[in-house]
Amino acid sequence: MIGYLRGNLLEKQPPHVLLDVNGVGYELEVPMTTLFQLPMVGEPLVLHVHLVVREDAQLLYGFYTKRDRTLFRELIRLNGVGPKLALALMSGMSVDEMIQCVNAEDTSRLMKVPGVGKKTAERLLVELKDRFKNWDSTPLAGQNSMEPAGLSAVTDANSPEKDAVSALISLGFKPAEASRAVSAVAQDGLSSEDLIRRALKGMA
């Protein structure tokens, strides 16, 4: 089991990142809350990792904090929640926002996540409320902030708008919905991370 990876950030292609660890490039999928906290391309980075082994693939999921990874692991233990839905849930809410949502029994907040209907939201609230009983809802210093630690353009030729739309589609949003959300917040000079953050906030 891979617990964490330490290396240099080579590329950000939301929702994927490429991490160079001693000459080996590891591709990881990350929630948007982690993406917003990543450093500039080329800078050192440590990501806490969860490995999923399937018959046709070995997938790495990266998280900026252990607390984020713990939430991911709790989510995928729930009935009907796979890695894709877990990342979608985490991309719209920080750990503490998720805890507040569950404690407030806010089904409407969960229903804004693609693939979560009313019945699924109600079931998730019931199951998560029990799991969150012993969780500390006070974030550690510098953790789970929705503000980016450092922003840079992705290293390929795609525009920030296209990258932002692709990232939202990967989370389960319909192409037309993702395009409208990004267009509504698009401004010259914004990075893909900024566009994604603003689009998700507008969908909340």
Image (cartoon, grey):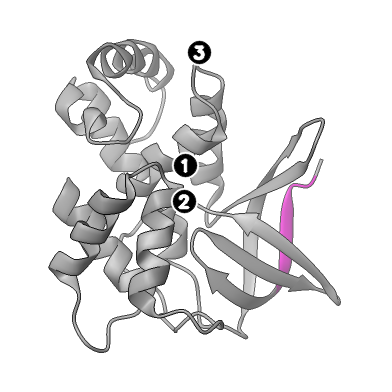
Q: Disc 2 marks which amino acid?
A: Pro
Residue 3 magenta-highlighted = yes
Q: Is residue 88 above or below residue 202?
A: above
Residues in magenta? 2-7
What residue is shown at x 20% (from left), y 75% (from top)? 186
Q: What percent of the width, then of the height, locates residue 57?
A: 78, 41
Label 2, secondary structure: give it. loop
Q: Which residue is mark 2?
A: 31
Q: Disc 3 marks which amino acid?
A: Asn
For the residues marked 3 and 2, what is the alpha-carbon distance in whole angstroms?
20 Å
Q: Which residue is mark 3?
A: 79
Hey, which quadrant is residue 149 in on the image?
bottom left
Q: Is residue 28 left or right of residue 108?
A: right
Q: Which residue is mark 1?
A: 87
Q: Disc 1 marks which amino acid?
A: Leu
Q: Residues within 10 Å of mark 3 (few under 14, many from 20)?
A: few
For the residues marked 1 and 2, what is the alpha-carbon distance in whole angstroms?
5 Å
Badge 3 or badge 2: first in the primary sequence: 2
What residue is shown at x 17% (from left), y 45% (from top)? 204
Badge 1 or badge 2: first in the primary sequence: 2
Badge 1 or badge 3: first in the primary sequence: 3
Asked if marks 1 and 2 touch (Cβ < 8 Å), the reply is yes
Q: Residues within 10 Å of mark 1 (few under 14, many from 20)?
A: many
Label 1, secondary structure: give it. helix
Hey, which quadrant is residue 59 in on the image?
top right
Q: What percent of the width, then of the height, locates residue 43?
A: 60, 83
Residue 139 magenta-highlighted = no
Hey, which quadrant is residue 122 in on the image?
top left
Q: Is residue 163 above or below residue 171?
A: below
